[in-house]
Image (tube, rainbow, N blue to C red):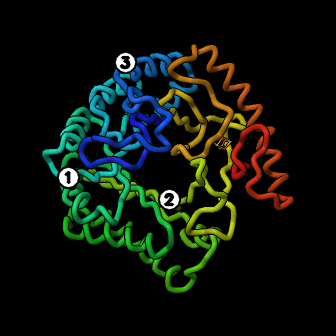
Amino acid sequence: MLSIFVEASCNRYNRDECVDCHVFEPLADISKPDWHMTPDQARLMATKIRQIDTLNALAQQEINLTGGEATQNPHIVEIVKVFQSVSPSVCVHTNLEINSKSSKRWLRLVEIIDEGARADITLYPTAWEKFQKPLLKELIVLQNRMIANLIFENLVHLQQQIQILIGFFDEEAPSFNHVIRLLQKYNEKVSWLVENQPECDETIYTTHMGDTEAFAREENFTLGLSLLPAFKVDTKGRRAMSSIPFPQTPYIINCPAARGSIDIMTVQQTGEMTPCCDVGNLKCQPKFGNLLTDSPNEIMAKFEQSRKKMFTGISKNQENLKNEKLGKWVEEGIPPYCG
Ligand code: SF4
């Protein structure tokens, strides 16, 4: 999958349209015209994706357009069409924290779905009743598939979010009975942990959750669930070693790129690429080239250079982890939680 930022990532925005946001850290360094990706930039990226086999292969799986908030980009409908020319499956990630059906952001989303793209959401309990719930009712009529991300800070927080979704789909039953069944499985598992192992570590959590399927599939509607632990970030915008719900153990990312396999590529708005799922807080220094400014040959050369650097960096990280030097950044610029 290719994950492409189409909007500056700030998490501080005015609902519906930005007015005076994007002026503080971490966006202070991004010049104003770069807040929104333009259709011309998207076209340039699409051309290069076609020319680079590795990226083209990832685009054939899916292109996920994200941010920041992708629907804030006034050109998002055109950008979606551009990326649809290189990928059979384009989805837009939204927080669905939108004032009303007359909002420009909602109207863009409707147009995007009309064009055959998919909208995925992240659930925010604080925005649920007022913003997300009424529009999710509309969204599940407009499209027949969706992924919901649940970001949790502790097990009770996760349990609450699962129960919010059960309550929601229960009101929409019977067409969503299969979705409710899947959510009930998650609810039972997480509720057991809340009751019996509230302070469990990540190993106990993952073992207990087992191989519970991630999708409830039926022809009328498919829901995918993605449960993601939250992380603190430091003043430099860098992720902590451990997640918030499981502080006992470092949360290690096994870097596929360092081992020669590119399974996912994140393209920042600046065009810089990182070969893993990065929401902007990994701060991996060796870049895999710039999709806006580098030629395909330059990008391929940087793939190889950076892959070697990553391999050396993660070997040092593994040593540091063994020697209890947790959190130490190595000179290769590989985050200390990558192994
Ligand atoms: S070293 Fe870590 S941050 Fe860098 S690409 Fe690999 S997994 Fe991602």
Q: Which mark is residue 176?
A: none
Residue drawn at the location 57% of the way across and 17% of the way down: 294
Q: Are marks 1 and 2 in contact (CB under 8 Å)?
A: no
Name the residue: 25% across, 62% down. 176
Distance from mark 3 CB to nearest ligand 1 atom below 8 Å: no
- Say the numbered circle drawn on residue 40: 3
The alpha-carbon separation of the residues under discs 3 and 2 comes to: 33 Å
Q: Is 142 left or right of 155, judged from the image as shown?
A: left
Q: CA distance from mark 1 to mark 2?
A: 26 Å
Label 2: which secondary element:
strand
* Disc with the residue nearer the chain's start (3 vs 2): 3
Q: Residues within 10 Å of mark 3 (few under 14, many from 20)?
A: few
* Residue type beneath disc 1: Asn
Question: What residue does disc 2 label?
Answer: 228
Image coordinates of residue 91 in percent, x first then y, are: 36, 39
Q: How many marks?
A: 3
Name the side, left or right, on which 184 lies relative to 285. left
Residue 59 x/y as whole percent: 47, 30
- Say which amino acid is labelled 3: Asp
Q: Which numbered disc flags the more N-terminal residue, 1 or 2?
A: 1
Residue for point 45% across, 34% down: 4
Ligand 1: image quarter: top right
Q: Which residue is mark 1?
A: 99
